[in-house]
Image (cartoon, grey):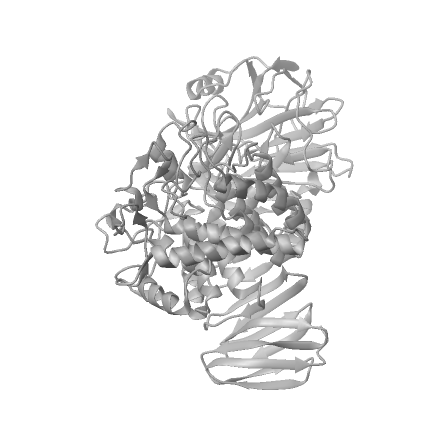
């Protein structure tokens, strides 16, 4: 039986300023500190008080000592100068609900598994416990501090925190307490554990350290308006866990729960911008410069992935990104607490992402709220620089190059490379930076395709919200499309390529050269030609896909960062293009390979990493990166999505799977495939059953009429129960047109 000897905490004796955020709840509680999944930050937006605590575990036996902490408050997260980082020892990234009603996290230390759970029964009450399954030689330091560089003094008395705002209660006093004006280093923590300090009834300090030796369990509760006793915690967490699962999309595959992996990765990334009073999902838990950091295309992709489970959080994330936009319109490569890239942006994918979010949610406010910000950013790309030249068309040939404004940039070529998002890509090894034009000397196929997409989706957004400038975007889209095909298509090699200003073709071949698919630039004939390269195992295809430089490139073995590794955003952009051009089987294969690789890493290493080795499929770079969720988002979108042509749903391979309660454009989808037999429900009504795998494309529900196409690799039979109709299908494309169907 576990012993319960517990804890703790702090009181603010001076008010700490926190700006009011977009959320309406007065009390925000979450693991908002970038370095501390093993702790919580409490933010009260009425009293503007803030306090935080984290559970730093240790092992001490016969001279051997290890200390797992969050980051030191005076050092970057990547530094572990006050002990080993908790992120190095995660055993299970557990459930975390989108509304923060429940969270579960486990980490391993020697023989012990620590399991932290916390949850809420309403907007004001918090309950938590930390359980250790091996108490001998294992202990805990509860570190209490003021986050976000706030100033003040913490006050601890008996086993509770009391202020005008907080009433945080623990089930026992710590055995030792020490206060400090600065964070303790690892050697100081060890001295505290071994020598200790006299126990006092109360203690004050900027940092408080509470010691619990050889413990099994500790519990805490804030406010407790629900009146729960300590003995009710286990039952509470069981209920909260079940409720979390019930209230989200549920997925079963041979590789695990794809939806949980996607949602929990994003929810555990959630952090806070004290400068703005806004919550957001950063690029990853280790991207923390000056208290927070937003990266442009990471933020857009994270918003898209968030929309699959919680559109409210997705909009909050967009709102944080819009807040970080500079006055001149630049949505920067990055902006953080102490700096930002005023000189350069990142890939202009925003309008495309916002449009896809609108298709998924039918929330027109995404378009209305986003359009002014996106328009300002659009104008930034097309504006003249202070040197009088077009900002990103240095040679004035009508095509775009990556660049960096030289009146603001520090290291010019490097910043221009960073603007591409593919920071050290081999594509740039032979490129140079022009100090006269402030751009590279190379017309970039990826940027030009992204600008086509930007114009395309600005036009679509403008039409929906009734803006008069939609035709201007359409004309620019057409102009740029024609110019790309005239100047960046190598007829001899049948490939799109980067091209230097002197007319020479770049011989580096990467995934960016398939972006004419997602942007709609390629003709069908051109698309067929480049897809052959995509499927070529000597160039790009294989067990683990897609590399960021072709396999026959001498730099492919580098497999470091953008020099050969697999990245989520490039896979997703190419997947979207394959769907657009009707390469459904190849899109399915790419989605399956991406998901399988990601789930393998999650299962074996409990990581959601930044990029992946193309030879082994193992993750590299940051261990916990938000946009890793794109791999699973891609898989789910391949099962159900709303496109410009209508709904697209179904499955073309033979794998067993089930999806429950996936909400897309106002309809709830359930899909189950078993032994090749596919069944689909829409809004909890039987919609179709098929004796072979099928993909429904361009399905339009129009009054009492349903029409579209069914794609299959087999002869089979599809039943529509609500219509009492049976459709015989053959391999290939099958047209469907049903009437009097009521969904």
x and y percent of residue 350 in the render? 53, 47
In terms of depth relative to the viewer, which is nearer, 278 or 473?
473
Which residue is at the front of the view, 743 or 247? 743
Residue 622 in the image: above or below residue 617: above
- State the image coordinates of residue 445 (x, y, percent, origin top left): 37, 51
Picture coordinates of residue 22 (x, y %)? 68, 36
Q: Residue at x 64, y 42 (%)?
A: 100
Q: Where the C terminus falls, by quadrant?
A: bottom right
* Label tally: 0
* Residue at image coords 46%, 58%: 518
Taking the image as shown, residue 550 lies to the left or right of residue 667, namely left
The quadrant holding residue 707 is bottom right
User: Which residue reaches farthest left?
Assistant: 554
Q: Position of residue 598 (x, y in %)?
A: 43, 53
299 shown above or below 543: above
In the image, residue 81 sits, relative to residue 628, either above or below, namely above
Screen quadrant of the N terminus:
top right
Where is residue 3, by image quadrant?
A: top right
Query: In this view of the protein, can residue 170 be seen by the observer?
Result: no
Q: Quadrant of residue 13?
A: top right
């Amino acid at each position: 039986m576990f012993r319960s000897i517990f804890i703790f905490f702090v009181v603010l004796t001076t008010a700490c300023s926190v700006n009011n955020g977009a959320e309406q709840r007065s009390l925000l509680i979450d693991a908002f500190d970038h370095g501390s999944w093993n702790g919580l930050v409490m933010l009260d937006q009425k009293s503007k008080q803030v306090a935080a605590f984290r559970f730093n575990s240790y092992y001490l036996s016969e001279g051997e000592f290890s200390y797992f902490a969050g980051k030191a408050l005076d050092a970057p997260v990547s530094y572990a100068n006050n002990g080993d980082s908790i992120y190095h020892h995660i055993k299970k990234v557990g459930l975390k609900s989108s509304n923060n009603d429940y969270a579960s996290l486990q980490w391993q230390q020697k023989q012990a598994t620590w399991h932290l759970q916390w949850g809420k029964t309403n907007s004001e009450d918090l309950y938590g416990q930390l359980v250790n399954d091996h108490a001998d030689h294992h202990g805990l330091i509860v570190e209490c501090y003021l986050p976000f560089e706030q100033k003040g003094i913490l006050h601890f008395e008996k086993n509770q925190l009391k202020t005008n705002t907080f009433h945080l209660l623990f089930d026992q006093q710590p055995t030792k307490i020490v206060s400090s004006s600065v964070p303790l280093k690892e050697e100081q923590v060890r001295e505290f554990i071994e020598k200790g300090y006299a126990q006092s009834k109360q203690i004050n300090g900027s940092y408080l350290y509470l010691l619990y030796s050889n413990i099994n369990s500790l519990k805490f509760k804030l406010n407790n308006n629900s009146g729960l006793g300590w003995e009710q915690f286990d039952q509470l967490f069981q209920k909260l866990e079940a409720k979390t699962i019930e209230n989200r999309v549920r997925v079963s595959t041979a590789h695990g729960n794809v939806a949980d992996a996607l949602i929990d990765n994003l929810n555990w990334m959630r952090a806070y911008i004290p400068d703005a009073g806004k919550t957001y999902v950063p690029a990853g838990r280790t991207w923390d410069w000056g208290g927070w950091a937003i990266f442009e295309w990471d933020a857009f992709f994270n918003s898209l992935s968030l929309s699959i489970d919680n559109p409210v959080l997705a909009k909050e994330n967009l709102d944080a990104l819009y807040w970080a936009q500079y006055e001149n319109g630049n949505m920067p490569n990055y902006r953080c607490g102490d700096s930002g890239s005023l000189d350069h942006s990142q890939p202009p994918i925003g309008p495309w992402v916002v449009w896809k979010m609108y298709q998924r949610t039918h929330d027109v406010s995404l378009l209305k709220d986003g359009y002014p910000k996106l328009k300002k950013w659009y104008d930034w790309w097309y504006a003249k620089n202070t040197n009088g030249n077009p900002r990103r068309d240095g040679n004035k040939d009508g095509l775009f190059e990556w660049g960096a404004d030289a009146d603001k940039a520090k290291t010019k070529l490097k910043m221009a490379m960073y603007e591409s998002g593919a920071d050290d890509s081999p594509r740039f090894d032979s490129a140079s930076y022009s100090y006269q034009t402030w751009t590279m000397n190379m017309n970039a196929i990826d940027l030009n395709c992204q600008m086509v997409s930007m114009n395309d989706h600005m036009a679509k957004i403008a039409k929906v919200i009734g803006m008069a400038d939609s035709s201007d975007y359409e004309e620019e889209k057409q102009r740029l499309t024609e110019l790309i095909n005239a100047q960046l298509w190598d007829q001899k090699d049948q490939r799109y390529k980067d091209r230097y200003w002197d007319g020479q073709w770049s011989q580096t071949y990467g995934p960016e050269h398939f972006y004419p698919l997602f942007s709609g630039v390629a003709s069908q004939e051109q698309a067929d030609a480049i897809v052959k390269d995509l499927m070529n195992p000597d160039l790009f295809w294989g067990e683990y896909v897609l590399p960021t430089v072709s396999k026959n490139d001498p730099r492919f073995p580098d497999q470091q960062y953008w020099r050969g590794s697999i990245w989520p955003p490039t896979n997703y952009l190419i997947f979207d293009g394959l769907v657009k051009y009707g390469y459904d089987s190849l899109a399915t294969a790419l989605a399956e390979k991406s998901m399988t690789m990601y789930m393998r890493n999650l299962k074996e290493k409990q990581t959601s990493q930044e990029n992946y080795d193309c030879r082994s499929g193992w993750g590299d770079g940051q261990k916990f990166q938000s946009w890793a969720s794109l791999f699973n988002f891609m898989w789910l979108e391949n099962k159900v999505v709303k496109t410009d042509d209508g709904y697209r749903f179904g499955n073309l391979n033979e794998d067993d799977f089930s999806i429950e309660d996936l909400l897309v454009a106002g309809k709830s989808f359930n899909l189950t495939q078993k032994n090749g037999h596919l069944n689909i429900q829409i809004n909890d009504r039987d919609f179709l059953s098929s004796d072979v795998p099928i993909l429904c494309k361009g399905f339009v529900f129009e009054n009492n009429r349903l029409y579209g196409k069914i794609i299959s690799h087999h002869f089979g039979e599809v039943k529509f129960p609500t219509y009492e109709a049976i459709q015989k299908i053959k391999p290939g494309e099958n047209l469907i047109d049903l009437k009097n169907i009521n969904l």
